[in-house]
Image (cartoon, rainbow, N blue to C red):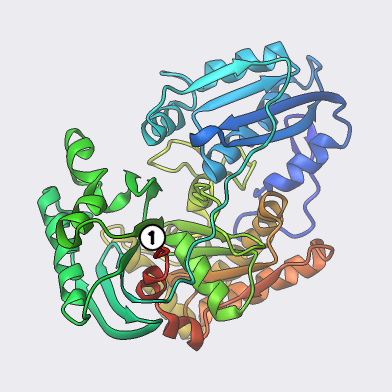
């Protein structure tokens, strides 16, 4: 198939989405005869930098393809690693294009605003003669078992807490709560403190606290998290950004603590249970969550927001309502992905049902052996194989840990089988190992792993 004058070869297409153009397929075809060197770098906090030296065509005939390739590359770097400043080297016209795209009123205004808020820095696009060098600051976290610790895992529907002594859990508690719909930040603060005190009651003392929480955290501060979406934005600065810092210090004083994105903690739990590092964790549930532990067992400080990393170059791809962009992971590897494909398979879903209820209906049909539901999961498996090959270009992981409601039951098994078949047929050269949570992983427990995050000196 052809897109923007680039012929894309796709050997395996999803049965329910034949227009799907894997972004990696487009990029490989695009780069086959692109000769003009350009550089893109994205700066994030602490002077850390993602930098890519690549090529464009630099011709009038393929200008639109050049723009598309570079804009998707920038979008990927922003949501994989994060950043507030884009450096462009090698092409003045490309610089002007990106400057127009990433601005107020521009095509990527959502990303422009989001990253500025996360990093508390105006978003900029600048032209340079010399591209800044890549710079990362990975951090070894977790695996600290000495002493009396508390691990807290903040989920969207329940919160879990563990009291741990020298690596052994002595108390676990799970409580239903409703953080996403509650607009009073005091509700969230009280829930966190209640969990901490409940665990502390089962310890002779508290030496450290580790927190696993959905969202983006920098220096233990909540920069953006769906848990607090209902809270008025004006209250975020005073009440939400420091909520974990205040809750822990108000309860225990000045003790070591760490607040880490739950995707990274999941990847860390996977590394512990599988006995290996270099793991990318992908959770397919309400959205697509990601986490990464590098080859040395460190977290990178990257955003890993795979939900907003583009995977499909099809101009007719479904739009994400929140970001306004198309072709991004959230519409392929979440309950939205299942619900998008179900009608195409002939499954009628009541519009009055919630996304989670629609997913349950498709899952129930799959458990009954319904071939329509099977087509849905096979198609997602095909999506996943192509996208994992793209993610591999970015992360060079060894193992992918697949979790979430979409991966449960017979549907998850068929999805995995379909993914493996496409990987073997089209990407046999990639050393990708797929893993599902086993009983050992479930025993490890997210909150118990969170307890091991901070070091105690």
Q: Residue at x 47, y 77 (%)?
A: 408
Q: Nearer the viewer, residue 392 or 308?
A: 392
Quick one: label 1, few (<14), some, or many (20+) residues within 10 Å?
A: some
Could you tell whether 299 is left or right of 21 in the image?
left
Q: Residue at x 25, y 71 (%)?
A: 206
Residue 240: name its quadrant: top left
Classify the position of the N terminus by image quarter.
top right
Instruction: State the count of labels.
Output: 1
Q: Position of residue 359 (x, y in %)?
A: 39, 68
- Height in image: 434 above or below 62? below
Identify the residue at the far front of this view: 457
**Where residue 196 appears, x then y in whole percent?**
20, 68
Q: Is residue 385 above or below residue 54?
A: below
Q: What is the x, y in percent for residue 23?
A: 68, 45
- Please tell me which residue is depicted at 65% across the width and 50% down the height of the picture: 20
Q: Nearer the viewer, residue 59 or 5?
A: 59
Question: On screen, 73 above or below 169?
Answer: above
Q: Examine the image and state in which quarter residue 416 appears.
A: bottom right
Name the residue located 50 percent from the left edge and 20 percent from the top edge.
124
Residue 258 screen position, x and y as percent: 37, 58
Q: Which quadrant is home to the C terminus? A: bottom left
244 or 405, which lies in front?
Answer: 244
Does residue 418 lie above or below 382 as drawn? below
Relative to the observer, which residue lies in front, 135 or 432? 135
Q: Secondary structure at mark 1?
A: loop
Q: Which residue is mark 1?
A: 286
Is residue 184 visible to us here? yes
């Amino acid at each position: 198939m052809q897109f923007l004058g680039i012929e894309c070869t796709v050997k395996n297409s999803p049965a329910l989405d034949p227009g799907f153009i894997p972004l990696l397929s487009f990029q490989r075809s695009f780069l086959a005869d692109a000769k003009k060197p350009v550089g893109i770098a994205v700066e994030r906090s602490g002077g850390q930098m993602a930098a890519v030296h690549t090529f464009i065509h630099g011709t009038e005939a393929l200008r639109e393809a050049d723009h598309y390739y570079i804009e998707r590359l920038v979008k990927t770097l922003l949501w994989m690693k994060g950043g507030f400043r884009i450096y462009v080297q090698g092409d003045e016209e490309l610089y002007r294009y990106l400057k127009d795209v990433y601005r107020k009123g521009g095509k990527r205004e959502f990303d422009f605003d989001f990253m500025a808020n996360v990093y508390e820095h105006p978003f900029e696009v600048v032209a340079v003669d010399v591209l800044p060098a890549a710079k990362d600051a990975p951090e070894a976290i977790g695996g600290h078992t000495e002493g009396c610790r508390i691990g807290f895992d903040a989920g969207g529907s329940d919160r879990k807490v563990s009291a741990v002594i020298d690596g052994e859990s002595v108390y676990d508690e799970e409580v239903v709560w409703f953080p996403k719909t509650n607009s009073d930040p005091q509700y969230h603060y009280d829930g966190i403190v209640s969990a901490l005190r409940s665990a502390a009651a089962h310890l002779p003392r508290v030496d450290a606290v580790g927190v696993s929480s959905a969202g983006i955290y920098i220096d233990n501060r909540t920069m953006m998290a769906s848990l607090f979406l209902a809270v008025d934005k004006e209250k975020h600065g005073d009440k939400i950004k420091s909520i974990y810092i205040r809750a822990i210090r108000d309860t225990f004083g000045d003790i070591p603590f760490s607040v880490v994105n739950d995707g990274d903690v999941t990847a860390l739990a996977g590394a512990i249970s599988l006995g290996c590092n270099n793991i990318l964790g992908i959770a397919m549930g309400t959205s697509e969550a990601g986490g990464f532990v590098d080859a040395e067992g460190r977290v990178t400080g990257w955003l890993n927001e795979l939900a907003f990393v583009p995977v499909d170059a099809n101009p007719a791809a479904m739009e994400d309502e929140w970001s306004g962009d198309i072709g991004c992971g959230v519409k392929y590897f979440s309950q939205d992905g299942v619900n998008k494909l179900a009608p195409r398979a002939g499954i009628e879903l009541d519009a009055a049902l919630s996304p989670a209820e629609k997913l349950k209906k498709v899952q129930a049909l799959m458990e009954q052996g319904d071939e329509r539901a099977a087509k849905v999961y096979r198609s997602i498996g095909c999506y996943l194989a192509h996208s994992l090959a793209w993610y591999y270009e970015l992360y060079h992981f060894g193992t992918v840990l697949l979790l979430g409601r979409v991966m449960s039951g017979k549907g998850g098994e068929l999805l995995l089988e379909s993914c493996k078949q496409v990987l073997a047929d089209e990407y046999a050269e990639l050393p990708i190992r797929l893993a599902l949570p086993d009983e050992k992983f479930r025993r490890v427990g997210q909150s118990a792993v969170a307890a091991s995050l901070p070091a105690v000196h």
